[in-house]
Every structure is written in C-alpha cells, then in structure tokens.
Image (cartoon, helix red, strand yellow):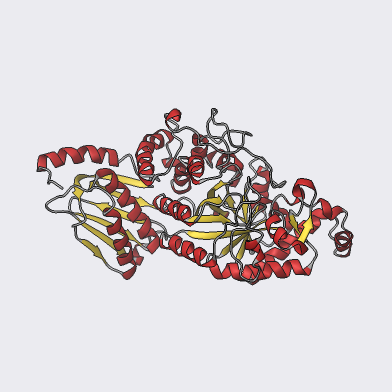
C-alpha cells in the first residue's frame, strides 16, 4: 500500500479517531482521553510477559491482518501483560494508550482477551490509529449469554462458529445450546443410537426432514472453538416436558400427553426413565466441561394429561404422598437435580423449578416469564442464583417492527426495550445483587427456518444485550448506542450477516419465513 504523507496521515487519523471514540461496544466503565495518538501496523513490535499473554498476542496479530491498516514509518508497540498483583477483577482489564505504546494489563487470560477485543475494535475503526487514552473496564454481570434453539430448526456448525466469533467481539461469554425438544434431538448419544436415527428426523415445519444433529466430534470442536474465545457452552437436555423427540425414538420412556402434546413428557415414575437420563448425562458431561447442565423443567402441564388417568402414575402419586400431578412434576425435577449433582454439575432450569424444592446449592434459576415477576422474587428470596431472560424483552422470536409479518405478536421486542433492560425491573433485585448472575438473549426457532432469518431476528438486538450485560447502568446511553450501530452494521456486512436496520427498515426487508404451522402436532 502506498505510504501516506505525514500531514495526510494526521488528517485522516484525526477523523478516524473521532469516529473511534464512538464505536466501542460495550461501552467501557471508565474512559479518560489523553493528549497524543497511537499508530500501529502488522509490522509493529509486540511484547508479552507470559505464555497465556503470548496466546492472546498471536490472536491479535491474526486479527490485525484482517483489517486495512495504513502503513507508518514507526508503528507503536503493543504490550500484553498478565499481572496478578494489580487486583484487577477476573474479567476486567486496564488499557493505557500513549503515542508510543498500547499497554494492556489484566490479572487473568479472560481479562486480557476482552481488553484485546476492545483494542481491536478501536484499531478497526481507526485503521491502525487510536486517540491516546486510559480505559478501565470490568463487566456488570458474570453471565452474558446467548441461547440458540436448534431443535426446532438446525443451523449447523459453521453458523454456530460465526456466532461465537461475534459473541467474543461483544464480550458475551455463555452460549446456551438448546439441543433437545419436541421436533428434533440434535446431539449424538452413542448408547442410544435411535435418538439420532429416529429422534433427529424432522423440524418444526417438516416432520420428514432428513436427520440433522451434531456428532460428538463436532460438539467437541464447537466447545473447543468457544473456549478459545472465553465462551462457556452450556447444553440443554429438556425434561420432563419437551421430550417428544426422545420419546419418539424410545416410546417406552413416554409419559404420554394428549392431542398436540402426545408424547410430550418422559414417564415420571419408571426407573427406566431415570436410568436413561443418567446414561445420557454421562455422555453429555464428557462433552461439555462447563459446570452447568440445563434441564428445562418448563411447561410440563402441557403434556401431563395422561398422568391424570394412568393407573401406575396415580398409584405412584398416592404411595409417594405427592398430593397431585404438580407434586409429581416437582418430584421429577428433584430427582433430575440429584442426577445432575451426581455427575459433578449444577442444574439450571426455567423458573418453574423454583417451586420444586431443589436445594439452591444444586440449581440455578433462569427467569423467563416476564409476566411472573413473583417467580423472580421468589427465586431470590429462596436463595437461588438467577439468570434473567424474560420473554419481554429478551426473546428473539418476538416481532421487532410493526410492519414485520412473522413472529410472536404478544408484544414487540423493540431494540430500545432490549437496551433498557434490566433497568425497568432492577428494583426487584435490590439486596440480592450477589445472587444475580446476569442476562441472556434467547432465540427460539419455531419461525426461524434458516440462517438469514436467524441473523435478522438476532441483530441488532444482540448488540443491545451485550451492552446491557457489560456496561453499568450509569454509563448506558441509548442515544450514543444508536450512533454506534452504523459502524457495527458495516462489520456485519463484511461478515455476510443479514440484519434488521431500524434506521431504514426498507433497506433490509424481512426475509421470507413460514409462519407457525403445527405440522408436528406439538408446541
């Protein structure tokens, strides 16, 4: 590339630096601007003080090769340092940039990684130039999550890895992988081959679609890819409801249901059911090193109609003094929690599990029912750690614009509402801040049949989640957030990601998607 004149470079960089100060996302906790500017290139010197820092440095070098950098005569030095003595929070970092050096300091590899992503953002915007500054940063929440439902529609490894890359840049650190549900079972379990030969057949709109699932080797590949980006992968194995695909493969495990909910539940009384669950968990535990396994635990009443007339089940309720079918559901959840604990893991469940009597030492609650705020409060009062992912505003299958035709219409999940969360309900968790793990954007795929529509329903709302999960309330500003979005839209364009543009909706028309057609008679 032709070298710019010194004056020309200064003029260019001045504009770039002005832009760079408005692109950082999530917004850092503290930012102080200094005099001077820093310029680097792929030829610039890089310094490290630790093998873990070496790894971060090598990743940074590869990132610089992917962006256009103006050549300079004397590129500045980039320094990556792990220093325990500075007492920087585990995911926090300090970035000091002067005219000669960009020094990144952290006490952990994760913190160094997030600081590297911040520096890369600024350099990408400034094409190698950054206004001298000091950034001190640490996340608001420990759990900064994104959930993808691949039971209803399967998107595949390449799409998942693309999303992991984007999540890493946004400092999102949990990928909740919904792999089992009614339409399809999406994870290879070698002890039970019918789960993939039979259970993986079909999707939400086509009950005869060819089996689609991840082999165990593919699972390992995705988990390793995520780990390199400091993202924890948490699998979900749904029970006792949403078990249709498993019961289709092994009908002897079915607890029945009626009509559209036929085969919806595992049988809650058979020891064969719990043996199956234990064996499946054994293989899942071997694939996912995360300390958590999500077991669902929601909406069981949709499929428990057969429980009322099954003589074996009714006798079991009476003998165990469980009172009624709800008591049986709670019994099942407690046994599931014990099984998960026996594998050395902590169970996560949707907010229905609050009433099951599981020890808070064994379970984490995911609050999803926005209209049941009492479940959030109850979970906190009973000592559970909680992750917030309420349908409104954090479900990605809700319509985001009045002119869109496909999606859930109970209420719009507008970008602005996503950004404001959790502030409208923050009063409910006062005094329980230590129990609040974080927030998550959850994408259910009934009406999302391909990658293009997945992108459209995810972006730009995932940007808002990233900022809300990282940035403290006092630093959030919806106006400044919206100003930054065009920079990130250009980035998505480069990645080939199709997003909704709220500034010009006609420029990104809603992609075709079949509306809800209950072909499978479930859900």
- For the point 72% across and 46% down, the residue is 521
Q: Position of residue 308 (x, y in %)?
A: 86, 53
Q: Is residue 12 left or right of residue 184?
A: left
- For the point 15% across and 42% down, the residue is 9
Q: Position of residue 337 (x, y in %)?
A: 68, 64
Q: Is residue 433 visible?
A: no
Q: Is residue 445 left or right of residue 87?
A: right
Total number of numbered labels?
0
Q: Is residue 353 left or right of residue 14?
A: right
Q: Nearer the viewer, residue 180 or 228?
A: 180
Q: Position of residue 60 (x, y in %)?
A: 30, 58
- For the point 58% across and 62% down, the residue is 187
Q: Is residue 148 left or right of residue 76?
A: right
Q: Is residue 35 visible?
A: yes
- For the point 32% across and 48% down, the residue is 121
The quadrant in which residue 105 appears is: bottom left
The quadrant in which residue 406 appears is: top right
Q: Is residue 240 above or below residue 444?
A: below
Q: Is residue 475 above or below residue 254?
A: above
Q: Position of residue 336 (x, y in %)?
A: 70, 64
Q: Is residue 279 above or below residue 211?
A: below
């Amino acid at each position: 590339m032709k070298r710019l004149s010194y004056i020309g470079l200064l003029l260019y960089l001045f504009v770039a630096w002005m832009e760079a100060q408005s692109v950082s996302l999530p917004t850092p906790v503290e930012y102080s601007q200094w005099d001077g500017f820093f310029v680097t290139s792929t030829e610039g010197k890089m310094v490290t003080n630790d093998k873990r820092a070496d790894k971060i440095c090598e990743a940074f070098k590869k990132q610089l090769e992917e962006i256009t950098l103006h050549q300079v005569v004397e590129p500045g030095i980039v320094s990556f340092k792990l220093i325990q003595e500075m007492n920087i929070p585990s995911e926090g970092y300090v970035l000091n940039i002067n005219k000669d050096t960009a020094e990144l300091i952290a006490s952990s590899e994760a913190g160094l990684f997030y600081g590297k992503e911040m520096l890369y953002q600024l350099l990408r915007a400034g094409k190698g130039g950054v206004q001298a500054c000091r950034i001190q940063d640490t996340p608001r929440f420990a759990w900064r999550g994104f959930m993808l439902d691949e039971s209803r529609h399967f998107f595949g490894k390449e799409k998942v890895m693309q999303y992991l890359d984007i999540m890493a840049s946004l400092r999102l650190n949990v990928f909740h992988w919904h792999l089992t549900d009614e339409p399809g079972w999406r994870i290879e379990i070698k002890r039970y081959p019918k789960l993939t030969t039979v259970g993986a057949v079909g999707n939400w709109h086509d009950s005869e679609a060819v089996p689609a699932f991840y082999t165990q080797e593919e699972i390992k590949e995705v988990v390793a890819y995520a780990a390199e980006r400091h993202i924890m992968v948490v699998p979900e194995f749904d029970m006792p409801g949403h078990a249709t695909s498993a019961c289709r493969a092994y009908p002897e495990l079915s607890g029945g249901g009626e009509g559209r909910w036929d085969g919806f539940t595992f049988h809650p009384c058979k020891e064969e059911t719990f043996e199956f669950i234990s064996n499946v968990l054994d293989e899942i535990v071997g694939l996912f090193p995360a300390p958590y396994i999500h077991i669902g635990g929601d909406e069981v009443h949709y499929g428990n109609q057969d429980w009322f007339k099954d003589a074996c089940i009714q006798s079991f309720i009476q003998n165990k003094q469980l009172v009624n079918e709800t008591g049986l559901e709670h019994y099942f959840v407690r046994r599931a929690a014990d099984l998960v604990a026996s594998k050395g893991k902590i169970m996560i469940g949707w907010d229905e599990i609050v009433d099951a009597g599981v020890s808070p030492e064994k379970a984490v609650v995911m609050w999803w029912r926005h209209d049941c705020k009492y479940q959030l409060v109850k979970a906190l009062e009973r000592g559970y750690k909680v992750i917030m992912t309420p349908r409104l505003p954090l479900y990605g299958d809700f319509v985001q614009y009045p002119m869109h035709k496909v999606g859930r219409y109970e209420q719009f999940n507008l970008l602005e509402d996503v950004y404001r969360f959790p502030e409208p309900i923050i009063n409910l968790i006062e005094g329980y801040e230590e129990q609040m793990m974080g927030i998550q954007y959850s994408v259910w795929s009934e009406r999302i049949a391909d990658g293009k529509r997945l992108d459209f329903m995810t972006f730009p709302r995932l940007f808002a989640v990233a900022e809300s999960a990282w940035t403290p309330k006092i630093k959030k500003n919806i106006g400044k957030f919206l100003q930054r979005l065009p920079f990130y839209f250009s980035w998505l364009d480069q990645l080939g990601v199709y997003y909704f543009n709220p500034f010009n909706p006609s420029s990104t028309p809603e992609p075709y998607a079949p509306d809800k057609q209950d072909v499978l008679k479930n859900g």
